[in-house]
Image (cartoon, grey):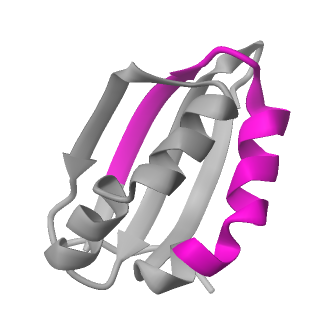
Amino acid sequence: MIVKLTQNLNRGFAPWKEMVHNNAHKMKEHGFRAIFAGTEAGDDSKLHVIMEFDSPASLEAFKNDAELTQARIDAGADLESTIVTPMSGESFSNFPA
């Protein structure tokens, strides 16, 4: 399942990226793969992520992981600003190869 996330970052992209890399084991545990993660040109506080989860249950496990949630907060993620949008199954990526 593909999901789009937008979120404000209080500390910019670098601390958030470091947090993601430091929690790779948790991401794998939750069936999470980042397809794209980056901020808007000229605004290091506006994060956009396209991610893939193994299943809706994987997404729920990710959302309910208190330790990972705290790590995201500590890295500057403004959870109040988070918008998560499930994408349709009718999609493609990496075209043309």
- Report the residue at 31% width, 85% height from top: 54
Visible residue check, residue 95: no
Q: Measuring 15% from the left and 64% from the top, which residue is drawn there?
A: 88
Q: Does 30 appear above or below 5?
A: below
Residue 67, x across and y down, in percent: 50, 54
Q: Position of residue 23 (x, y in %)?
A: 67, 65
| In this view, 15 is above or below 33 | above
Q: Which residues are magenta?
A: 4-26
- Location of the N terminus by quadrant is bottom left
Residue located at (35% from left, 48% from top): 4
Label count reads 0
Q: Quick check: 13 left or right of 76?
A: right
Residue toward you, 80 or 88: 80
Note whether 97 is above or below 45 in the view shown: below
**Closer to the camera, 88 or 49?**
49
Image quadrant of residue 40? top right
Residue 57 % position (x, y): 17, 76
Q: Is residue 3 left or right of residue 44?
A: left
Q: Residue at x 39, y 42 (%)?
A: 5
Is 11 contained in the magenta span? yes
Q: Nearer the viewer, residue 16 or 50?
A: 16
Residue 16 location (% of width, % of height): 71, 40
Locate the C terminus and report the quarter of the image it occupies.
bottom right
Q: Residue 36: name its quadrant.
A: bottom right
